[in-house]
């Protein structure tokens, strides 16, 4: 399938991988993107907040709720429960992901590790079928398991990338993976939104809540079912350390992680790239997270407009990832990511100037976000693969995933503080420009070819 959607991009060849294997790798993005779009982006926040409000004694369908719940004896406002869970998940992820990466590097059965993480996350998502009534604690526990497992599986999945293609091929491979992921995630989300629209009953909030729960469950089923393809088609590429380790994989992984943490200063340019990614990616994640709030509160748009825009972003990100991947073959991934940050800056400025109560300009801007979103993420992933010392792919992608997820509170914090001072969502949005400007400056300062050589790798022809 991946070979037919973008014939303009030549299928990369690599002596250590096959076309079937690369197609299997693409389909894990197809599998897990359902969790990111259907669960995290759309349904889980409102669903779990409603369940928590019921536990706090509020009526279903009430316009507001001032009640509280007491998990572990701690008083928590019902509306704050889900954001606090996200923060706790991020905190736990910081400790889990590097360990998972180190274990992956030491294991000769990396596919089993991918399977364990993916099926654990998918199983926890499917178990939301039992989150009924006031079971907010069960919902919170399942979310923590699913979200941490999601990150762990992504670390293992990303660590396959350097074995799937040479230096000149990885941008295309990574871009195809992101593109296929956006297509799969968008397809399931569209099906769920159609189901919710057709089956909802006006004046029946319980029906709406049930439809949201089963939409979440469908994402877990999708995730588990399509994970079978990469598990069947991917091949093991054990490192030399894994082949000659002979010890306990978990304890060896911890020891290796300790050595890497002590030796990481040997690769200061790789760390500098991670710092640049940390900054500009936080800006990207904040735009994605707060776009709906901006559209609702500042632009006074209907929910239907936001839903159409979310779908538009998903499907245009498919083409955008492939288009920027093709551009990277001509001018290099580093220059293409820098160009994408300039485009992101333009998106922020355009969003500041959007008129209120005007759906069409908002949807057009959403389309622009989709076109630049997939490519900037895909090429950052492939560019980082060039900066990883051989045999430590899992560990370094563990650090990368922390940079992706572990700092996503900085942008929302800046946005929130500026809004508190100015009472303006528009000014709050403009505050995010600093992340793209500083991120661009940091990334531009990385001597990327020298950084690749310093990591012991061969640079691609074009950077």
Image: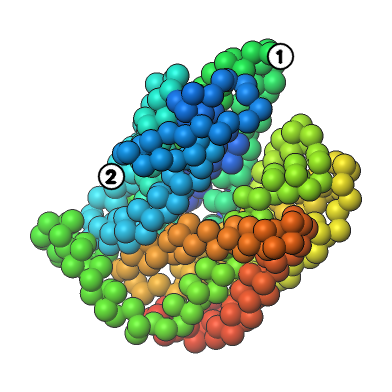
Q: Position of residue 87 (x, y in %)?
A: 45, 51
Q: Position of residue 256 (x, y in %)?
A: 22, 68
Q: Position of residue 324 (x, y in %)?
A: 68, 61
Chain-order first, disc 1 or disc 2: 2
Q: Please identify the quarter of the rendering in which residue 184 is found.
A: top right
Q: Residue at coordinates 51% horizontally, 29% vertically from top-left?
A: 53
The label number, if any, that marks residue 202 in the structure image: 1
Label 2: which secondary element? helix
Q: Residue at coordinates 81% horizontally, 41% vertically from top-left?
A: 300
Quick one: 282 or 252, which is closer to the camera?
282
Residue 303 visible here:
yes
Which numbered disc, 1 or 2, marks the residue closer to the eye? 1
Q: Residue at coordinates 89% horizontally, 50% vertically from top-left?
A: 355
Question: How would you rate the neighbour count of disc 1 (Cα within 10 Å): few for under 14, some for 14-19, many for 20 or more?
Answer: few
Q: Which residue is mark 2?
A: 112
Q: Please identify the quarter of the rendering in which residue 248 is found.
A: bottom left
Q: Position of residue 176 (x, y in %)?
A: 58, 52
Label 1: which secondary element? loop
Q: Is residue 459 above or below residue 410?
A: below
Say whether marks 1 and 2 touch (CB < 8 Å): no
Q: Is residue 46 left or right of residue 255?
A: right
């Amino acid at each position: 399938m991946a070979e037919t959607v973008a014939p303009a991009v030549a299928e990369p060849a690599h002596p250590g991988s096959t076309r079937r294997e690369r197609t299997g790798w693409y389909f894990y993005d197809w599998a897990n993107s359902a969790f990111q779009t259907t669960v995290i982006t759309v349904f889980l926040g409102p669903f779990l907040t409603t369940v928590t409000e019921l536990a706090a004694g509020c009526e279903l369908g009430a316009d507001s709720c001032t009640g509280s719940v007491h998990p572990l004896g701690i008083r928590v406002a019902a509306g704050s429960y889900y954001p606090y869970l996200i923060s706790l998940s991020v905190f736990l992820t910081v400790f889990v992901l590097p360990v998972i990466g180190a274990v992956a590097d030491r294991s000769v059965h990396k596919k089993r590790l991918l399977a364990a993480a993916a099926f654990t996350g998918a199983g926890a998502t499917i178990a939301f079928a039992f989150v009924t009534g006031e079971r907010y604690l069960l919902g919170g526990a399942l979310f923590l398991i699913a979200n941490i497992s999601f990150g762990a599986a992504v670390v293992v999945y990303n660590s396959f990338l350097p074995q799937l293609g040479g230096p000149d091929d990885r941008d295309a491979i990574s871009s195809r993976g992101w593109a296929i992921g956006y297509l799969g995630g968008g397809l399931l989300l569209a099906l769920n939104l159609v189901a919710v629209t057709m089956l909802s009953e006006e004046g029946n909030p319980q029906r709406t809540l049930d439809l949201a729960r089963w939409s979440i469950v469908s994402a877990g089923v999708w995730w588990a079912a399509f994970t079978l393809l990469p598990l069947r088609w991917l091949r093991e590429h054990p490192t030399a350390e894994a082949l000659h380790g002979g010890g306990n994989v978990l304890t060896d992984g911890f020891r290796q992680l300790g050595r890497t943490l002590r030796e990481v200063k040997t690769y200061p340019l790789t760390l500098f790239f991670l710092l640049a990614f940390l900054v500009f990616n936080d800006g990207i994640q904040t735009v994605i997270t707060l776009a709906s709030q901006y559209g609702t509160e500042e632009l006074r748009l209907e929910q239907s407009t936001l839903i159409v825009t979310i779908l538009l972003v998903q499907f245009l990100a498919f083409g955008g990832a492939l288009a920027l991947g093709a551009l990277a073959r001509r001018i290099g991934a580093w220059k293409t990511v820098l160009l994408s940050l300039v485009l992101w800056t333009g998106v922020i400025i355009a969003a500041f100037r959007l008129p209120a109560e005007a759906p069409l300009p908002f949807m057009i801007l959403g389309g622009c976000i989709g076109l630049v979103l997939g490519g900037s993420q895909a090429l950052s992933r492939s560019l980082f693969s060039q900066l990883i010392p051989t045999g430590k792919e899992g560990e370094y992608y563990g650090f990368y995933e922390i940079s992706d997820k572990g700092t996503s509170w900085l942008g929302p914090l800046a946005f929130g503080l500026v809004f508190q001072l100015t009472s303006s969502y528009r000014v709050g949005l403009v505050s995010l420009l600093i992340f793209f400007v500083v991120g661009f400056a940091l990334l531009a300062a990385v001597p990327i070819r020298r950084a690749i050589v310093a990591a012991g790798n061969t640079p691609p022809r074009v950077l």
